[in-house]
């Protein structure tokens, strides 16, 4: 008989798998970063910097106030633990997973503009690759300075050059050595960036790659449906379904039911089953715990939508809203902005969830002060909007 889990059991399993049952270290080190990378597999990248870069937040949510140079060194210096590629979206990927992405590099999945640029401009593709070889590390803007200007190449411009570089990046023919201060990719050859053992790794066929990635997703989630496992690395339905079946047959995944869910789920064989979770964390909109919104709603009863691209007057909660995890529940959300000129963490709005415990305001206020300190800000400005604004403002004033 298939085991049945309650939603609470599934939620606690997910929180344990994501690292929220471990106490934050006093002095986070590279060892702690490696442990989080082992768990998650990647940190999603996003260009929005209203609070801090998205790829820096998952470590903060799990380790507390850490030195961000840990991430910069892991990505930008040898020996590299992180390399940039398309995982869930653009991400800093565990370098050990890079060989499993070769099936994607060899596929035709890339979106239209990049695919068309590579297909229609073979001369520019060859020229750009040689430029990276000769001049890398190099940005698209730096490469544009040397772009041929003769009449035969009148259509070549910076935008097209950028698309061609992205074509080469997707194909794995170039990679990203780092991001510069303007957050532009700095392109270089893989052999000058990736560790030798990664370059020498035996190629995986598509089926083997999907098994590895689905298994990693299952370990990172603890428990999840096929949709959850597929979304983690944005895999296709067919090969994901086959990988799940093979992993079940191998005993790596165990079929389970979750009460109230209308789809079968799968439990990783090593998933811990915490009886209690004492977490306290603010989560980026791009955190793996919450980036699949259907899963978030089913696990936590927390309906979450990012409203960055919603016109201001139509936003419900705000521009850059972070869920607040307390214990084993998402109990509140806050719209945050780092006002660096004033040295202030601005809480633009605050909202509380039904059933949130009485100490939510004091715990959230304390966490906001820790976050401000980590960001190098001196003060926290209380919210002026939201159904939790008054209570949170009082808690902030009492600190």
Image: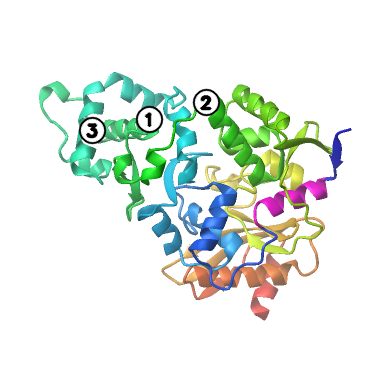
What's the image's color scheme? rainbow
Residue hosting label 1? 171
Quarter of the figure with residue 3? top right
Residue that sits furthest to the bottom in the current view: 398
Q: Earlier in the sequence, mark 3 or mark 2?
A: 3
Local secondary structure at mark 2: helix
Q: Residue at x 63, y 38 (%)?
A: 215
Quarter of the figure with residue 269? top right
Q: Position of residue 200 (x, y in %)?
A: 38, 38
Residue hosting label 3? 128
In front of the other: 37 or 282: 37
Bin the neighbour count of mark 2 within 10 Å (Cα to Cα): few under 14, some 14-19, many 20 and up.
some
Q: Which one is closest to the eye, mark 3 or mark 2? A: 2
Local secondary structure at mark 1: helix
Q: Position of residue 309 (x, y in %)?
A: 52, 42
Q: Tell me which secondary structure the magenta stretch mostly adopts.
A: helix
**Quadrant into which the N terminus falls:** top right
Q: Earlier in the sequence, mark 2 or mark 1?
A: 1
Q: Position of residue 152 (x, y in %)?
A: 13, 21
- Residue 356 vs 361, above or below: the answer is above
Q: Is residue 51 shown left or right of residue 145?
A: right
Between the C-alphas of marks 3 and 2, the distance is 28 Å
Residue hosting label 2? 206
Q: Magenta residues, as a range?
A: 7-19
Q: Is residue 356 shown left or right of residue 296?
A: right
Residue that sits furthest to the right in the current view: 1
Between the C-alphas of marks 2 and 1, the distance is 15 Å
Between the C-alphas of marks 1 and 3, the distance is 13 Å
Q: Is residue 254 shown left or right of residue 90?
A: right
- Residue 316 vs 266, above or below: the answer is below
């Amino acid at each position: 008989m298939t085991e049945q889990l309650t939603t609470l059991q599934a939620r606690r399993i997910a929180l344990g798998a994501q690292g929220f049952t471990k106490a934050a270290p006093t002095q986070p080190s590279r060892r702690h970063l490696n442990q989080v990378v082992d768990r998650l597999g990647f940190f999603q990248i996003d260009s929005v910097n209203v609070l801090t870069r998205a790829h820096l937040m998952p470590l903060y949510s799990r380790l507390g106030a850490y030195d961000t140079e840990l991430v910069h060194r892991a990505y930008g210096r040898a020996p590299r633990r992180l390399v940039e590629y398309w995982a869930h979206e653009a991400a800093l990927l565990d370098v050990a997973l890079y060989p499993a992405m070769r099936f994607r590099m060899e596929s035709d999945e890339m979106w239209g503009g990049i695919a068309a640029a590579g297909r229609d401009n073979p001369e520019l593709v060859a020229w750009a690759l040689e430029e990276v070889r000769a001049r890398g590390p190099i940005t698209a803007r730096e490469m544009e300075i040397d772009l041929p200007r003769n009449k035969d190449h009148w259509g070549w411009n910076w935008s097209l050059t950028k698309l061609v570089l992205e074509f080469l990046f997707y194909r794995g023919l170039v990679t990203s050595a780092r991001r510069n201060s303007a957050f532009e990719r700095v392109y270089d050859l893989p052999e000058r960036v990736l560790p030798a053992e990664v370059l020498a790794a035996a190629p995986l066929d598509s089926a083997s790659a999907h098994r590895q990635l689905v298994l990693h997703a299952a370990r990172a989630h603890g428990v999840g449906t096929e949709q959850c496992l597929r979304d983690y690395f944005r895999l296709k339905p067919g090969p994901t379904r086959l990988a799940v079946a093979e992993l079940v047959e191998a005993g790596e995944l165990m079929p389970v039911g979750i009460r109230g869910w209308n789809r079968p789920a799968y439990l990783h064989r090593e998933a811990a089953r915490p009886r209690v979770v004492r977490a306290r964390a603010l989560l980026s909109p791009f955190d793996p715990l919450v980036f699949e919104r259907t899963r978030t709603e089913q696990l936590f009863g927390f309906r979450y939508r990012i409203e960055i691209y919603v016109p201001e007057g139509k936003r419900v909660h705000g521009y850059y809203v972070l869920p607040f995890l307390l214990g084993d529940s998402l109990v509140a959300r806050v719209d945050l902005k780092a006002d660096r000129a004033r040295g202030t963490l601005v809480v633009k709005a605050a909202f509380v969830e039904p059933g949130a415990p009485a100490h939510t305001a004091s715990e959230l206020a304390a966490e906001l002060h820790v976050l401000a300190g980590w960001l190098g800000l001196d003060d926290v400005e209380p919210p002026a909007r939201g159904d939790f604004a008054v209570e949170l403002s009082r808690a902030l004033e009492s600190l």
